Image (tube, helix red, strand yellow):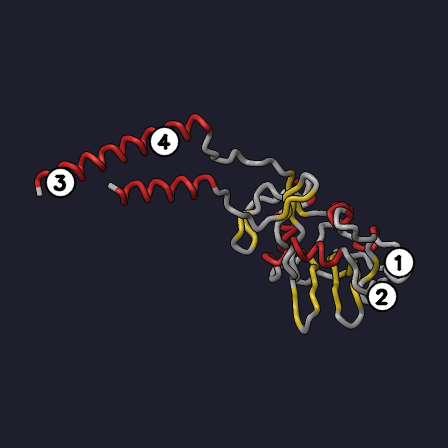
């Protein structure tokens, strides 16, 4: 009987403790981790999240169901990064401004896992849905007319930068959807009263069983 009570107690505690999701909730949107899609190219993402369907995804990517998520644009990622205080993007490897010991890079990495990490360097880069990456970058050296990626480069030697680059490379995907909290199974006060009543009955039954066993002994 006591074993049953313990099992019920554990079940209640598990029910009352919400699970922690890998996604990031910021400014009313739920963002998936770009690091979950590092081996997937822009073309693969675009095939599931086409511009003809407002970039809304249908299907799985890398074994993850992304139905209902949106293949983010540079503007949308910029809005996300602005919540961390990240400046506007520049061209990666070109005239991208570098900042020593920025406050925004650690803040972003506190929520998002790096898409690449080595020798103390951390990168959070992922493909965006824009067909022309240079349309959103004010840089005289950016004259490409193709899709690409955007993200944070945190280099121990050169500092932190937020930049974009052209080309379809498998480095991740910026995917989001408007956040609507799902109803969480929270034990209400009335439910607590019911559970306490059940506990009381089980405890009383356990005591009666113990007394009866003692008399028989």
First in sequence, mark 3 or 2: give its number: 2
The spot of residue 140 in percent (x, y) is 91, 60
Q: Quadrant of residue 34?
A: bottom right
Q: Is mark 1 on a helix, strand or loop?
A: loop
Mark 3 or 2: the one toward you? 3
First in sequence, mark 1 or 4: give its number: 1
Q: Quadrant of the C terminus?
A: top left
First in sequence, mark 2 or 1: give its number: 2
Q: Is residue 143 visible?
A: yes
The spot of residue 142 in percent (x, y) is 86, 60
Residue topped by disc 3: 213
Residue topped by disc 2: 94
Residue topped by disc 4: 196
> What is the crowding at mark 4: few (fewer than 14 residues within 10 Å), some, or many (at least 20)?
few
Q: What element carries label 2?
A: loop
Q: Distance between the residues labelled 3 and 2?
A: 83 Å
From the viewer's side, name the closer residue of 12 and 69: 12
> What is the crowding at mark 2: few (fewer than 14 residues within 10 Å), some, or many (at least 20)?
some
Residue topped by disc 1: 139
Q: Distance between the residues labelled 2 and 1?
A: 9 Å
Does the CB distance between marks 2 and 1 fall below 8 Å?
yes
Q: Is mark 3 on a helix, strand or loop?
A: helix
């Amino acid at each position: 009987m006591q074993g049953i009570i313990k099992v019920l107690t554990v079940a209640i505690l598990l029910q009352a403790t919400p699970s922690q999701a890998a996604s990031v909730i910021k400014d009313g949107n739920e963002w998936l981790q770009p690091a979950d899609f590092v081996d997937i190219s822009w073309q693969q993402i675009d095939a599931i999240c086409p511009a003809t369907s407002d970039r809304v995804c249908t299907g799985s990517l890398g074994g993850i169901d992304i139905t209902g998520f949106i293949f983010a644009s540079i503007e949308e990622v910029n809005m996300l990064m602005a919540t961390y205080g990240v400046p506007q993007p520049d061209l990666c490897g070109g005239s991208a401004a570098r900042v020593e010991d920025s406050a925004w890079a650690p803040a972003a990495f506190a929520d998002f896992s790096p898409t690449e990490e080595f020798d103390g360097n951390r990168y959070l880069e992922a493909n965006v849905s824009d067909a022309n990456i240079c349309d959103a970058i004010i840089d005289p050296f950016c004259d490409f007319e193709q899709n690409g990626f955007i993200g944070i480069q945190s280099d121990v030697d050169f500092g932190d930068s937020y930049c974009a680059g052209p080309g379809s490379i498998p480095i991740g995907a910026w995917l989001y959807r408007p956040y609507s909290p799902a109803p969480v199974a929270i034990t209400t006060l009335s439910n607590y009263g019911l559970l306490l009543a059940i506990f009381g009955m089980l405890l009383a039954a356990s005591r009666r069983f113990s007394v009866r066993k003692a008399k028989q002994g």
